[in-house]
Image (cartoon, helix red, strand yellow):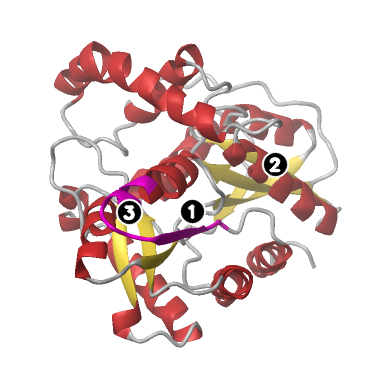
Amino acid sequence: MTRHFLPEPPAQAPRIGVLLINLGTPAAPTRAAVKPFLRRFLSDPRVVELPRLPWQILLHGLILPFRSGQSAHGYEKIWQAEGSPLAVYGERMAQALAARLPDCCVAHATSYGEPTVAATLADFKRQGVDRLLVLPLYPQYAASASAAALDQVWRVLLQQRHMMAVRSITRYGDDAGYLDAVAGSIRRHWQQHGRGEHLLFSFHGIPAAQHQAGDPYVAECERTAAALAQRLALTPEQYTLAFQSRFGRAEWVGPSTQDLLQTLPQNGVKKLDIVCPGFAVDCLETLEEIALQGREDFHASGGTQYHYIPCLNDHADWLDALYALVQRHLQGWTE
């Protein structure tokens, strides 16, 4: 079989590209914008590991018509003047990193939204990039997130005749700079708002079947939570790890964040702090699901004080840690 490669742009002076990838976001908080975004996301076999034909029938016949409007309503609640928080903070991170790496091309792209990985890598090619460092912005590795982002890169490189050299950072949940930045964020929040009776670490969940198939995600979340608890001098009774964002009827890893928000007040925890160390930037799952809906659920179950601690976003400590992380993985290329 003959492979048809994309034409190569005119030769440029060799450069290094640094690509930050996140999941993505719709272009607007509307049903019309959300539906194609969800279709791309939920059609990825890395995300939903079910037989294709039955899943596509269910997706197009039931899930997209219902969930598009529901998600659009959630996006309306969190949308900023500049756009979606995930896109806004992702672009700010890329700009801050570019300022520190003036000899590199730095960009933010998304797996299922805009800007696409394909368009961003095409732009890198035009700028002469021949060495590429890819960083999926997921601290803990999951096939449905980190690997799915890297799949997008390899699909593009398969079409290149003169393929870029590639390095990837597949996880950073145990990186000291990242952990220090998260712990510092929690301490600052306590200093400004007071400290609750319990700290809940909420990570995005994955189906139990993916965990049982060998996905290392749960173990990496446990290590991140333990490392943060150690930095904050927490005893095992003072914090809990949980998983949020369940979808569908299949079994997911637990315990469930949503269940705990209802049971913790019944078990005596009336003042709760909650943080999401599996998200690089705030998004629908943190701002709407946890900060807004989570507060309602906790108070409805008898809680009296609920504080959501924001993601690192573009905080200076995180940008310092991000730069140091990237620099370590560029060794040998930048010297």
Q: Is residue 157 left or right of residue 56?
A: right
Q: Residue at x 25, y 53 (%)?
A: 301
* Residue 2 x %, y %: 45, 19
Q: Which residue is mark 1?
A: 279
Label 2 CA crowd tier, 10 Å (few <14, some 14–19, many 20+)? some
Label 1 CA crowd tier, 10 Å (few <14, some 14–19, many 20+)? many
CA gap, disc 2 and disc 3 = 33 Å
State the extent of the magenta-drawn residues as a range.
296-311
Q: Verify CB contact (< 8 Å) between mark 1 and mark 2.
A: no
CA gap, disc 1 and disc 3 = 21 Å
| Mark before the other along the chain sequence, 1 or 2 | 2
Image-quadrant location for residue 118: top right
Q: How many marks?
A: 3
Can you tell which mark lies on residue 91?
2
Image-quadrant location for residue 330: bottom right
Q: Residue at x 31, y 71 (%)?
A: 240
Residue 261 drawn above or below residue 112: below
Q: Which amino acid, by three-letter code, is at mark 1?
A: Phe
Q: Which amino acid, by three-letter code, is at mark 3?
A: Phe
- Between label 2 and label 3, give the one nearer the viewer: 3
Q: Verify CB contact (< 8 Å) between mark 1 and mark 3.
A: no
Q: Secondary structure at mark 2?
A: helix
Residue 308 located within the stretch drawn in magenta? yes
Q: Is residue 200 left or right of residue 128?
A: left
Closer to the camera in the image, 44 or 3: 44
Can you tell which mark lies on residue 298?
3
Residue 55 drawn above or below residue 104: above
Q: Which amino acid, by three-letter code, is at mark 2?
A: Glu
Q: Secondary structure at mark 3?
A: helix
